[in-house]
Structures are given as structure tokens and as C-alpha cells.
Amino acid sequence: MAYNENLAEKVRELLQESDGLSEKKMFGGLAFMLNGNMACGVVGEELMVRVGPDGYQEALAERYTRPMDYTGRPLKGMVYVEEDAVAADLDNWVNRGAEFASTLPPK
């Protein structure tokens, strides 16, 4: 599956100052890793964000989000954010993913 290169570039720019930034092809798209832990990524036209188990229900309560179900089963702590929400609030979503990833031990 292809991913939106323009969206990936915007995410890359937002994370460029983050410690331990790397990129990895995952889930049919591109994932952005901080110290080896996935923070967010781009799959198709959507942003995938790792919000963690504590932020999961709160994230799902927001418009334009849905459970990340790449495997056919929802992955707890991960959400897809639709294109409309990404366009309006990309900084917030990328920061949420980066904040959660920063709570995890480096890999």
C-alpha cells in the first residue's frame, strides 16, 4: 500500500528535532520511531498514532478517529486519524504520539 508522501514529509518536519528519530516501513506505510518505539506513521491518506492504553478511549472519542485494525483486530493504544482531522490538527496528533513514545524505554 502506498502512503501519502506529502503527509509523511510534514510529520518528518514536525519530528526532526526529536531524539532518536528513525523511519521504518510498517503496516503498509511509513512509521516514525523515537528511540526504537513507534510514535506515529502514515498509512494511505491517514495518520496512525500510538496514544497508549491510557489515551486510547479519549482519542477514539474525537471526531475522525477509529481503532487501528490493520490485522483485523483493533490494536489497543493505536488509532487511525482521518485526513480531515490531520489537515486541521496535525501538530497535536504527532505530539500525542511522540509524547507516548517518550514514556517508553529505548529499544
Image (cartoon, helix red, strand yellow):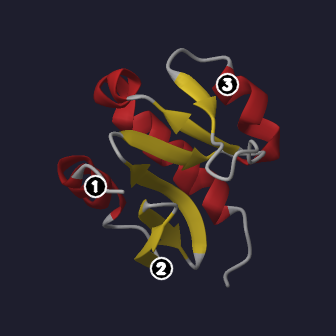
Residue type pointed to by label 3: Leu
Relative depth, front residue between 52 and 26:
26
x then y, percent, for residue 44: 35, 46
> In which quadrant of the rendered image does the N terminus lie?
bottom left
Residue at horizontal 67 percent and vertical 85 percent from the top: 107
x then y, percent, for residue 59: 65, 28
Q: In terms of sequence position, does the residue under pointer 2 or pointer 1 come before the other?
A: 1
| Farthest left residue in view | 6
| Farthest bottom residue in view | 107
Under tag 2, what secondary structure?
Answer: loop
Q: Distance between the Cα atoms at labels 1 and 3?
A: 22 Å
Residue type pointed to by label 1: Ala
In the image, taking residue 37 as reference, residue 31 lies left or right, namely left
Q: Which mark is residue 8?
A: 1
- Where on the picture, by quarter, is residue 86? top left
In the image, taking residue 52 as reference, residue 26 lies left or right, namely left
Residue where numbered disc 2 is placed = 20
Under tag 1, what secondary structure?
Answer: helix
Q: Distance between the Cα atoms at labels 2 and 1?
A: 17 Å
Q: Are marks 2 and 1 in contact (CB under 8 Å)?
A: no
Residue at horizontal 68 percent and vertical 53 percent from the top: 71
Nearer to us of marks 2 and 1 is: 1
